[in-house]
Image (cartoon, helix red, strand yellow):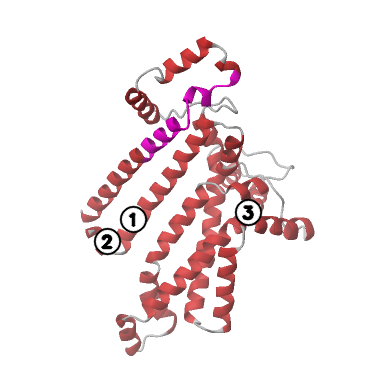
Amino acid sequence: MEQLKFIARRLVYLALMLFGVATIVFLLSRLAGDPVTANLSQRALSDPAVVEAYRARYGLDKPMLTQYLYYIRNLLQLDLGTSIRTNNPVLQELGRCYPATIELALFSILIASVFGILFGIVSAVRRNSALDQTVRAISVTGVSIPSFWFALLMLFVFYYKLRLLPGPGRLSNAFSAPAHVTGLYVLDSLLEGDGAKAADALRHLILPSFVLAAFTMGLITRTTRSNLLDVMSTDYIRTARSKGLTGHALVIRHALGNALIPVLTVIGLGLGNLLGGMVLVETIFNWPGVGQFAYQSVMSVDFPSVIGVSLLIALNYMVINTVVDILYGAIDPRVRCR
């Protein structure tokens, strides 16, 4: 019952934050200028009938408060407007590009989490050894290296020179896109029963995923190491050692659980960053995700699409933070009382 109340509180906070973000986006959109000028083309603006119809459709001929109520109503109806660049509904455009970002983000955060936690454990257990220094150097490099430069380097080495992995895109030219079910090419190809296509889609994920995982992996490694060292110096761990418990049993069964609680925050923030779309990496790898869509929208001054991407990114962060809070409560019951 206590856990359900905790989840309910977090969901209420989520709804309030969504309302707040939507309000801020509305105010910023109005401060940026006349929505009619921002949304309609020059040809449409020259036709008074089109301008008047647009104003009437979205309530822009009404007072600001009435406009805000129209805006909230449209959001509740999942109406984000029409893209100026493609002339398609913004929600449809986001639905087209978001699965590509989800696939890339999930694969990247999986790599970052597995290697980051593993490296952090090894580094903490072998503290101040040569292996520890090597792992710390890798983590600092991952955090420090510019993603666009790392992306170009990976393409040059593994695609151009060694020919081990495919280049930009989600599939090779020999394959057509799988039938849309989830939008995730690997999963959709498996649902089609085409193992070769699924393997090709997976190989295309490797390079951009490792590039995107580098930064988050470095943060996870450092966070895991520092927290595990702190936990290993606590009284209950010393008591476990005095009872003869050592090695993997001490680290995995007693220390790691508490050490990983702060790591959840790093993983959540990393996933939020990835789902927001990494513009440069997606552009370099010609990955048709949210980042590339945002870049194209900004370059073409596609105001409705920019607002749609902003709301989507904010929603990503809020949902992920809410899930992390709920996981905190599941792992540590003390959190539920806050």
Q: In the displayed structure, would residue 98 be above or below residue 56?
A: below
Residue 148 lies, in percent from the top left, at 64, 54
Distance between the alpha carbons at the discs numbered 1 and 2: 8 Å
Q: Where is mark 1, residue-wise?
A: 325
Residue 210 lies, in percent from the top left, at 61, 59
Secondary structure of residue under mark 1: helix
Amino acid at dot 2: Val
Q: Is residue 144 left or right of residue 80?
A: right
Residue extent of the magenta highlight = 21-42
The main secondary structure of the magenta stretch is helix
Secondary structure of residue under mark 3: helix
Q: Are marks 1 and 2 in contact (CB under 8 Å)?
A: yes
Q: Where is mark 3, residue-wise?
A: 208
Which dot marks residue 335?
2
Mark 1 / mark 3, whichever is N-terminal:
3
Q: What residue lies at 47% left-to-right and 78% top-to-bottom?
A: 124
- Relative to the observer, which residue lies in front, 227 or 176? 227
Residue 289 lies, in percent from the top left, at 58, 42
Amino acid at dot 3: Pro
Q: What residue lies at 64% left-to-right and 45% top-to-bottom?
A: 283
Q: In the displayed structure, would residue 288 be above or below residue 253?
A: above
Let me know if residue 31 is in the magenta part.
yes
